[in-house]
Amino acid sequence: MKLIGLSRTIALTMAAMALGITLFVVAASYVFYYLAFHFWEGSVSEPNMLPTGPEWAWLAGTTLVGLAFAVIVGIHLARRILVPLNSVTESIRRVAQGDLDARATSVDRSLGEAAVLANDFNALADQLQRMSKDMAFWNAAIAHELRTPVTILRGRLQGLAEGVFPPETSQFQSLLTQIDGMAKLIEDLRAVSLVENGHLNLEIKPCDLSAEIESVVEFCRHALNASQHYPTLDLQSGTAYCDPFRIRQALLALLENVRQHASPGAITIQTRQDDTGYVLRVIDAGPGIPQEDAAHIFMAFRHARNTDNGTPGDKRGSGLGLAVVAAIAKAHRGEARCTPSDEGGSCFELRWPTQSHST
């Protein structure tokens, strides 16, 4: 059997240990008999210090047996240790070649660090695989979201160039609308990506949160009324510490989500402040979000299912709005969540701590 690397080292170490123990026992026996013959006369009979032929054979045989046993134990131990190490090595090679399904062989927990190494590698491989799938999903979702406005722009521009469409103000306004939609999508993607990477810089400062909310609602009032949504303000006055631009961006995303998906009716925009932080709520009249969807409703490109039949819900919009809300909350060291409202709809809540907690 050819031993290399760690196996050879372990086997040789075990053999050296066995040989050393044997030599120590022999040497200690000589010392014992020497002391016994010189200081404890009569305690040992037949003071012959040299082993006889059978004794030499016995010592040699036991030494060889000990060495063989040590080598066998060393090889077995080396194999146990090398199984996870070789598995991790092979899995790393496969991952480097693009096989993200590669996993190290699970091993006996008694091996300690070797088992921890294999488990840590498997956890790393799982994370890499999830990131790869998320990246593929994001690429497909972004391509899908950009395909429609780009197709419309190309068709309209081609029509204008060929004289199919007259160069009227309405045509250019339509083109601007598509461009604005693409710009918003790009900004939303940028905000979500920056938060995930920890690079979204906030300008935290004291501001009148009620005034900021009122300005956003007034800006959106016409669009909300056109979709038969009627905002009602329930604002608590006071100074809040936040990035007012990002809070306005989050509220715009919440109102746009309500406009696209909520049933016509009243919308309540509510703010609250206490010693722990600030809360911004947008409460709609329905139809509500299934409890199983509430956990991932703030993930990018995720859409809640219809409450009537459980099928995927209305997919108007990019699917980034609520992800932007969650990203802004995270940047403020807060959280975003969705809970059922008392009116049978949904309550979207953005919560972030006071200045002492967020700095």
Image: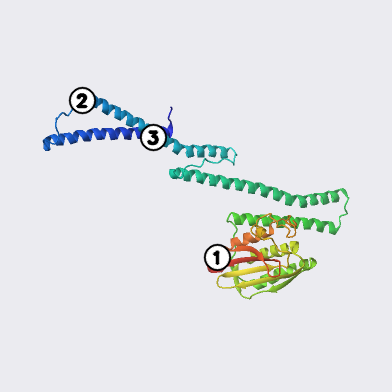
- Check the image and tell me how it is coloured: rainbow
Residue found at x 66% / y 71%: 270
Residue density around tag 3, few if under 14, some if 14–19, many if 20 or more, within 10 Å: some
- Which label is found at residue 15? none
Q: Position of residue 84 (x, y in %)?
A: 48, 39
Mark 3 vs 2: CB contact within 8 A:
no
Query: From mark 1 to mark 3, how far is it between C-alphas?
Result: 58 Å
Identity of the amino acid at label 2?
A: Thr
Question: In what element is the residue under mark 3?
Answer: helix
Q: Which of disc 3 and disc 1 is earlier in sequence?
A: 3
Q: CA distance from mark 1 to mark 2?
A: 86 Å
Q: Image check: 160 left or right of 300?
A: right
Can residue 328 be seen at all in this image of the molecule? yes
Q: Please tell me in which quadrant of the rendered image residue 95 appears.
A: top right
Q: Mark 1 packing: few (<14 Cα in 10 Å), some, or many (20+)?
A: some
Give the mark, 1 or 2, whose residue is nearer the N terminus. 2
- Which residue is tagged 3? 73
Q: Which label is found at residue 52?
A: 2
Q: Residue at x 40, y 32 (%)?
A: 8
Q: Give the residue pinned by disc 1.
A: 358
